[in-house]
Amino acid sequence: NVGFSGGERKRFEILQALLMEPKLLILDEPDSGVDIDSLSVISMKIEELYRRGTSILLITHYGRILQHLDPSILKVHIMKDGEIVMSGSGELVSEIERRGFQKIFEECGCDE
C-alpha cells in the first residue's frame, strides 16, 4: 500500500479483512485521516464484516465513525487510565459529545 492516501490505506486494510474473514478484527482508529466518502465506505464494510460473523473491536477517539454504523450493532465502552469505566449503547457517545467527558466522569464517580 505504498503511495496510498490515508483513506486508501484504511480501505485496503478493510478489504484484506473481508478476504481473510477473521473471527476477531481489531481496528485501531479506522476513522483517522480519512475523508467523509472513505469513512462511509469503511463503515459499510465494517457492518458487512459484522454481519458475516466477525467480532469487531473498534478503537476510536471520535464518534464520527459510529454515526455511520447501525446503532443496533454498537456496544460502547469508555476507558480511563486503562480500565473500562462505562459501557452503553451508541447514545453514550452522543451524550459525551454533548456534555464532555468530565461531566460524565463526575456523575459516575470516575473523575478521581
Image (spheres, rainbow, N blue to C red):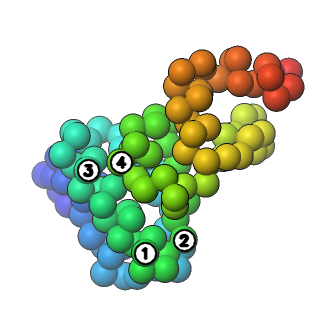
Q: Amino acid at mark 4?
A: His
Q: Which circle's residue, 2 or 4, is located before the other in the chain? A: 2
Give the labeled residue for mark 4. Answer: 68
Q: Which circle's residue, 3 or 1, is located before the other in the chain? A: 3
Q: Amino acid at mark 3?
A: Ser
- Residue 95 shown left or right of residue 16 in the figure: right
- Residue 7 shown left or right of residue 60 in the figure: left
| Circle 3 SS class | helix
**Mark 1 nearby-residue class (10 Å; few <14, some 14–19, many ≥20):** few
Q: Which circle's residue, 1 or 4, is located before the other in the chain? A: 1
- Residue 75 shown left or right of residue 67 in the figure: right
Q: Residue 106 placed where, x, y %?
A: 79, 19
Give the labeled residue for mark 2. Answer: 55
**Measuring 59% from the left and 29% from the top, which residue is drawn there?**
95
| Circle 4 SS class | helix
Q: Residue 27 placed where, x, y %?
A: 46, 57
In contact (CB < 8 Å): disc 4 and disc 3? yes
Q: Amino acid at mark 2?
A: Ser
Q: CA distance from mark 3 to mark 1?
A: 17 Å
